[in-house]
Image (tube, helix red, strand yellow):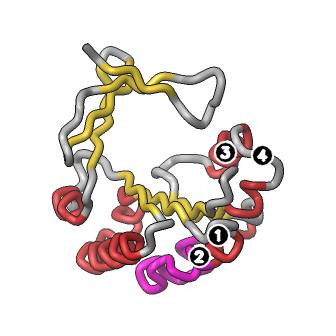
């Protein structure tokens, strides 16, 4: 966001949007987050801060809308024309459990649209026990697995394969963590 990119985010289940906004604000300059951030929430949009949009109420269904109107709203505010879309597949899977095929179609469409635009990126967050995990992973060019081991967050590339790294807090930048290779 500091570089001018827009961000559209549907956070993980249970993530408080106000807390998420505080984390993002702590690492952004000026009004960067207010100008170029939309967080979709399952909460009533009248009850939350203006950048948050009720994905289940205001936009009838993220499946029907394919998130495109929200992404385009952020794109218009982006000074680079680029948008990072962060989607909690687990959140969407829970909301639309009765129509997982349609959810997969919409995710495939979002991924395809993102791959056509070199300035865009999509980050999908999915739990290891998700029923649609293998289908979602097969759509992606890259896949990184996060897990907790001995109270440390470990990440490693699975597609393509990479070395294991520990994710550490960076006191210099609370948004951008440090990665330390496990040897």
Q: Which residue is mark 4?
A: 29
Number of callouts: 4
Quadrant showing the C terminus: top left
Looking at the image, is mark 4 or mark 2 nearer the viewer?
4
Could you tell me how far apart the alpha carbons at marks 3 and 2 are, in whole angstroms?
A: 19 Å
Residue at 78% from the left image edge and 46% from the top image edge:
29
Callout 4–callout 3 Cβ contact below 8 Å: no
Q: Which residue is mark 1?
A: 53
Residue 147 lies within the magenta run: no
Could you tell me how far apart the alpha carbons at marks 4 and 2 are, in whole angstroms?
A: 22 Å
Density class for disc 1 (Cα within 10 Å; few <14, some 14-19, many ≥20) is: many
Circle 4 sits in a helix, a strand or a loop, which is it? loop
Q: Which residue is mark 3?
A: 24
Circle 1 sits in a helix, a strand or a loop, which is it? strand
Residue at 56% from the left image edge and 74% from the top image edge:
71
Density class for disc 2 (Cα within 10 Å; few <14, some 14-19, many ≥20) is: many
How far from the left and from the top, in percent, is residue 127? 30, 48
Please indicate, yes or no, whether residue 95 appears anywhere in the rendered image: yes
Looking at the image, is mark 1 or mark 4 nearer the viewer?
4
Circle 2 sits in a helix, a strand or a loop, which is it? helix
Marks 4 and 3, the one that precedes in the sequence: 3
Marks 3 and 1, the one that precedes in the sequence: 3
Residue 59 lies within the magenta run: yes
Could you tell me how far apart the alpha carbons at marks 3 and 1 are, in whole angstroms?
A: 17 Å
Q: Is residue 102 above or below residue 8?
A: below
Quadrant showing the N terminus: bottom right
Give the extent of the magenta segment: 55-72
């Amino acid at each position: 966001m500091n570089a001018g990119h827009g961000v559209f985010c549907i956070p993980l289940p249970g993530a408080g949007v106000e807390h998420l906004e505080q984390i993002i604000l702590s690492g952004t300059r000026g009004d960067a987050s207010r100008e170029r951030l939309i967080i979709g929430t399952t909460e009533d949009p009248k009850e939350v801060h203006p950048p948050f949009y009720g994905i289940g109420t205001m936009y009838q269904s993220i499946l029907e809308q394919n998130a495109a109107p929200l992404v385009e709203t952020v794109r218009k505010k982006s000074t680079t024309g680029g948008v990072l879309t962060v989607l909690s597949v687990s959140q969407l899977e829970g909301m639309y459990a009765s129509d997982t095929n349609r959810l997969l179609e919409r995710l495939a469409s979002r991924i395809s649209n993102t791959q056509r635009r070199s300035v865009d990126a999509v980050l999908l967050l999915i739990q290891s026990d998700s029923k649609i995990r293998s289908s979602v992973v097969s759509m992606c060019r890259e896949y990184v697995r996060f897990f907790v081991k001995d109270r440390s967050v470990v990440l490693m590339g699975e597609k393509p394969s990479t070395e294991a790294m520990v994710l550490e807090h960076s006191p210099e930048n609370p948004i951008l963590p440090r990665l330390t290779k496990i040897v």
